[in-house]
Amino acid sequence: MLDNRKVVFSGVQPSGNLTIGNYLGAIKNFTAFPEEMLRFYCVVDLHAITVRQVPAELRRRTYETLALYIACGLDPEKNCLFVQSQVSGHAELGWILDCYTMFGELSRMTQFKDKSQKHADNINAGLFTYPSLMAADILLYQTDIVPVGIDQKQHLELARNIAERFNGVYGDTFVVPEPYIPETGMKIASLQDPAAKMSKSDPNENAVVRILDDPDTILRKFKRAVTDSGSEVRYDPTEKPGVSNLMTIYSCFTGKTFEEIEREFDGRGYGDFKTAVGEACADALRPVQDEFKRLTADKAYLEEVMKNGAAAATHYARKTLSKVRRKIGFVN
Ligand code: AQP
């Protein structure tokens, strides 16, 4: 424990313009934790370089991701918002945990397999050891709860195994974290391929709705979304994966249940439904976009937030690191 508070930690990579998958699966839920908890939300730029990034874009997106955290309702006075590479403890603990993570475990990670296929010309060691750095991110802050989308569940299970393994060797060192995966929104699918996750780095723009897309673009993308045979709006992820994905998005933005949505669009067909989903999404994102515009116009403020966040995170990270160093046998 860092102090007597429960700890929440999560992060988002500045590896592209954020999608409504990132928003509904992760960021929106970051605001759900009470003020009594110690809350760390990180822009995980060290993870982003496992895939080649254009330096100027990575820098811009790092500011923008931080601004989006704030625009989505995370008050920097009440949450520790920071950039991963500005707290050296992440890389340090990442290396240490590499030595407590098995090659076989990393080889089984589905994200590694997917990303190796997508980036066959750059299957670097960082892509392979990504999960042990993620374990370090989490364990560094003695985290109790990690809000993530379902795609990160396997990595989180590995983080738990690493923590338990380390604790088994050296005695209680790390809190073993629990995932917090939202029931609705844990996996927002691509609008063009309902079997695939919506990903910010998807080269097909029509597959992805971005948090910062303007209302016309949002509406157009939903109108072009792949649906299923028939015309009935019914929640059935096996038979109607496209419509069910749209229903999930609509439910997340409006708070309506699937039964309510089915009643609302009974006999109205897909066209009306897609327009309603697009409008609900655009309406919900408008205040976030307005706030984002205001924040990104003030770079000095964002830098101040980064600086304060990094200082606070470093304070807590040092506590864990000094304990880890002592247990391992490093000379302080
Ligand atoms: N489609 C999604 N549905 C629900 N949750 C999602 N998340 C990502 N996509 C969806 C959640 O967002 C958080 C941050 O994700 P990330 O930046 O660490 O990377 P990712 O999971 O690899 O997301 P992307 O968008 O697919 O990025 P790229 O394209 O760069 O690989 C996580 O909690 C994730 O679960």
Image (cartoon, rainbow, N blue to C red):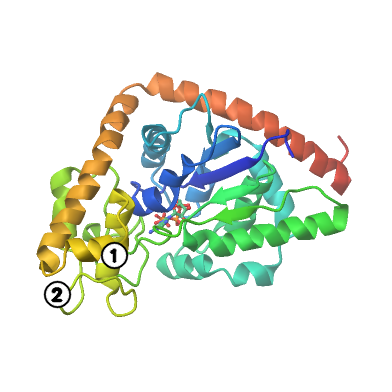
Q: Which image quarter is the C terminus in?
A: top right
Q: Say which amino acid is labelled 1.
A: Glu
Residue 253 in the image: state x and y as whole percent. 30, 49
| Residue at x 16% of width, y 68% of height | 266
Discs 1, 2 touching: Cβ within 8 Å: no
- Where's residue 33, x and y in %? 52, 40
**Which amino acid does the dot numbered 2 rest on?**
Ser
Near-viewer residue (57 or 305): 305
Residue nearest the observer in this picture, 259 or 44: 259
Task: Classify 10 Å Cα crowding around label 2: few (below 14), some (14-19), many (20 and above).
Answer: some
Please count the marks in the image.
Answer: 2
Q: Is mark 1 within 8 Å of ligand 1?
A: no
Residue underneath mark 1: 259
Viewport quadrant of the N terminus: top right
Q: Nearer the viewer, mark 1 or mark 2?
A: 1
Q: Residue at x 41, y 19 (%)?
A: 300
Disc 2 element? loop
Measured Cα–Cα span from mark 1 to mark 2 = 17 Å
Q: Is the CB atom of the residue marked by disc 2 within 8 angstroms of ligand 1's nearest atom?
A: no
Per the rendering, the mark at residue 132 is: none
Residue 206 image-quadrant placement: bottom left
Q: Residues within 10 Å of mark 1 (few under 14, many from 20)?
A: few
User: Viewed as shown, does residue 244 lie left or right of 229?
Assistant: right
Return the residue nearer the eye: 183 or 205.
Answer: 183
From where the camera sits, is residue 125 visible? no
In the displayed structure, does residue 291 sit left or right of residue 128? Answer: left
Above or below: residue 258 compared with residue 237 = above
Residue designated by label 2:
231
Q: Earlier in the sequence, mark 1 or mark 2?
A: 2
